[in-house]
Image (tube, helix red, strand yellow):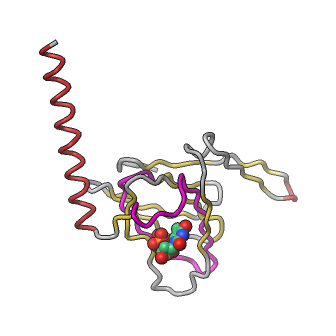
Amino acid sequence: MQINVKNCKLIELKKIVDEKDGILSVAEQNVQIPFEIKRVYHIYGLNDISANRGYHAHKKLEQVIFCINGSFKLITDDGNNKNNFILNNPNKGIYIGKNLWHTMSEFSQDCIILVFASDFFNESDYIRDYNKFLKYIEELNWLILIISRKNIILLVLK
Ligand code: TYD
């Protein structure tokens, strides 16, 4: 799986296979999940073929998203690049870091999504307008450029 968007990576949980007794996968904070887990939520009842979710980015929140039953399509977009994922494996999730636009669609009817989040729900952390997201990313990039130039100038003057 080739991932070329920023703040996005595959999280693979190990599988403890008990033959006829099934499979166990574990997610622990700051181990497989790369942050302190403050909230867990799940999404289900995805019976409508035209269901679409997401269509937002977060300014600070980090999340890891698993499809623990069925399948769906996840698209992540850092403003420059996009990645498409089909999530259909309970032990393979995607880390969605900050400033990453994401959408979810093509849910199977039996789809159950499980999400670990780094903070409590906070609507003011959401960017729900794609053009505002692009503008936010552009402003952030300018800020990073200005800070790095300032640091270079300070280094030269030292
Ligand atoms: P949203 O994050 O937009 O869901 P998705 O990304 O899956 O499309 O949330 C949908 C609604 O649920 C929105 O009104 C906010 C509310 N919500 C909470 O109240 N608490 C939560 O922890 C989450 C994730 C959503």
Left or right of 99? Residue 9 is right
Check the image and name the residue furthest to the right.
Answer: 20
Q: Is residue 149 above or below residue 69?
A: above
Q: Which residues are magenta?
A: 96-125
At x 27% / y 62%, what residue is drawn?
Answer: 133
Left or right: 69, with 57 as reference point: right
Point 16% across, 20% down: residue:
154
115 within the magenta span: yes
Q: Residue sitting at 55 percent across and 44 percent down?
A: 35
**Image vertical order of residue 118 relative to residue 112, above or below:** above
Left or right of 19? Residue 43 is left
Q: Is residue 105 visible?
A: no
* Residue 34 % position (x, y): 55, 43
Could you tell me residue 78's position as x and y percent?
32, 54
Residue at 38% from the left image edge and 70% from the top image edge: 55
In this view of the protein, can residue 19 be seen by the observer? yes
In the depicted view, which residue is nearer to us: 50 or 137?
137
Query: Could you tell me residue 84's position as x and y percent?
Result: 41, 61
- Figure quadrant of residue 54: bottom left
* The magenta stretch spans residue 145: no
Q: Which corner quadrant holds the C terminus?
A: top left
